[in-house]
Amino acid sequence: MKASVYFIDDDAKQAFLALDIGRAEDQDIHGLLNEAFDRLAADAFCGTQVPKRLIPKTYLAKYGIDNLWKYNLKRNWRLMYTVAGDGTTVIALIIEWLPHKEYERRFGY
């Protein structure tokens, strides 16, 4: 199902924009994210849904989300997003992207 892709807040958007003018590694991540955003626009449910009991409390407190999805990027990066909609419109809200080690710490693995 086609979806619109947005950032969940201005901090996420600014972090993404900063990648494009950052170091070469940051620019690579920017490219990977753009590819992922295109994939999410085609199908917001293409990632892996995180069980509700595993959603970090920081996400719950800051964003009040009730679902969380993970999209695996190349180079062991993870894109975290939530899906919202009204039955006819689907929106993927980008929360953050992080390297696998940080992802494991955040989720307590």
Image (cartoon, rainbow, N blue to C red):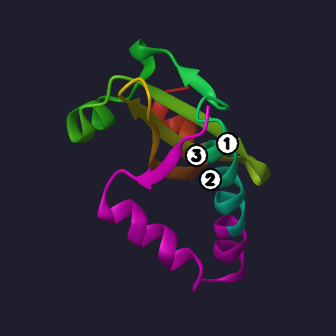
Q: Amino acid at mark 2?
A: Phe
- What residue is shown with label 2? 37
85 left or right, relative to 22: left
Q: Amino acid at mark 3?
A: Leu
Camera-side residue of 5 and 105? 5
Front disc: 3 or 1 = 1
Camera-side residue of 95 and 93? 93
The answer to which image quadrant residue 55 occupies is: top left
Give the secondary structure at mark 1: helix
Q: Is residue 90 magenta?
A: no
The label on residue 79 is 3
Confirm whether residue 100 shows in the render. Answer: no
Give, as a single range, the part of the protein colored magenta.
1-30
The x, y position of residue 9, in whole percent, is 31, 56
Camera-side residue of 98 and 104? 98
Give the secondary structure at mark 2: helix
Q: Residue at x 31, y 30 (%)?
A: 65
The x, y position of residue 14, in whole percent, is 40, 72
Q: Are marks 3 and 1 in contact (CB under 8 Å)?
A: no
46 left or right, relative to 80: right
The x, y position of residue 93, in whole percent, is 43, 45
Q: Amino acid at mark 1?
A: Ala
Q: Are marks 2 and 1 in contact (CB under 8 Å)?
A: no
Q: Is residue 6 magenta?
A: yes
The answer to which image quadrant residue 47 occupies is: top right
Earlier-in-chain disc, 3 versus 2: 2
- What residue is shown with label 1? 42
